[in-house]
Image (cartoon, grey):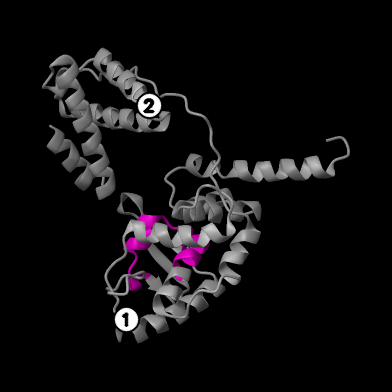
Amino acid sequence: MLFSFLTHLEYEKRSSAHTVAAYRHDLQQFSDFLKGAFELEDTTQVGHAEIRAWMVDLIEQGLAAATVNRKIATLKSYYKFLLRSGEIDKDPTFKIKSLKKPRRLPAFIQEAAIDKILDEWAYSDDFEGQRDRMVIEFLYLTGVRLSELIGLQWRQVDLQKGEVKVLGKGKKYRIIPISNSLLKNIIRYQKLFRETFSNVSESDYFIVRITREPTYPMLIYRIVRNQLDLFVQTTKRSPHVLRHTFATHLLNKGADLNAVKDLLGHASLAATQVYTHNSIEKLKAVFEQAHPKA
């Protein structure tokens, strides 16, 4: 049934390869636990007690609440699938509740620091230097995910309309407008791309290595980390921080929450609302500084 479930995720729910791999790993880990702790080979014979025991085991291993909750979410999806398929007549995860986790606001970069990264840092004029600048600028000015940037091809970048068509989670496309400043830099980057590789094909990836091959996550991480290390004090220096910064800066400037949701490619407004807390913190700081009775 595990194979059928993973096939359902990939072809019916159109989950990403990363998501399918994570579900496979979680379910294999759960299956190994059942065999070791209860000598159970069949996941359809599992009850509430066995799942609770696995949760306790994960917690004792020192896993974060968010990680445990993700693994439990995997089980919930799996057993709902089994219930709909008629393999079980009762969902053993029905009474399982997620662990409470501390609320952490998304880390973001102050506008002054972003300005320094984009305007003051001397990027080299060769292809790799300008590519690195494009990585930083594109992540911040479009809010795309790491995987979306890596998978982006030139065919998805419409310089005439000033927009980019991004393939996001659930294999759904969304349109993101390109600002005038970013558009000018993309045109300059495209010219350098053509000079470096003789031409620009629609099937070429937007961000590539000097070999013209696609990039990979660790390369993008290194590019972002190298630039942020010079200007940013925050301990988080990942590509996702630039996505957080994109959303936070938009909301701080009064952008509509639903519009930001669509730009980020969130399925629900709840996922976007977390960024409003940063805006509220900014308002509190202004109040405490300016109000005579604060």
Whether residue 280 appears in this view of the structure is yes
Residue most extreme to the right: 292
In the drawing, does residue 90 fall left or right of residue 96?
Answer: left
In the drawing, does residue 36 fall left or right of residue 267?
Answer: left
> Which residue is the site of mark 2?
62
- Where the C terminus falls, by quadrant? top right
Nearer to us of marks 2 and 1 is 2
Q: Identify whether 219 is placed above or below 6.
A: below
For the point 31% across and 60% down, the residue is 216
**Crowd tier of the residue under label 1, counting other residues whose Cα lies within 10 Å: few below 14, some 14–19, many 20 or above:** some
Q: Identify whether 141 is placed above or below 62.
A: below
Q: Position of residue 34 (x, y in %)?
A: 18, 21
Q: Quadrant of residue 280?
A: top right
Residue 153: within the magenta?
Answer: yes
Label annotation for residue 200: 1
Q: Position of residue 285 (x, y in %)?
A: 74, 43
Residue type beneath disc 2: Gly
What stretch of residues is rendered in magenta?
134-156
Q: Position of residue 292 (x, y in %)?
A: 88, 39
Q: What element carries label 1?
A: loop
- Where the N terminus falls, by quadrant? top left
Q: Which of 125 and 89 is in front in this view?
A: 125
**Crowd tier of the residue under label 2, counting other residues whose Cα lies within 10 Å: few below 14, some 14–19, many 20 or above:** few
- Please tell me which of labels 2 and 1 falls first in the chain: 2
For the point 56% across and 68% down, the residue is 118
Residue type beneath disc 1: Val
Q: In which quarter of the image is residue 45?
A: top left
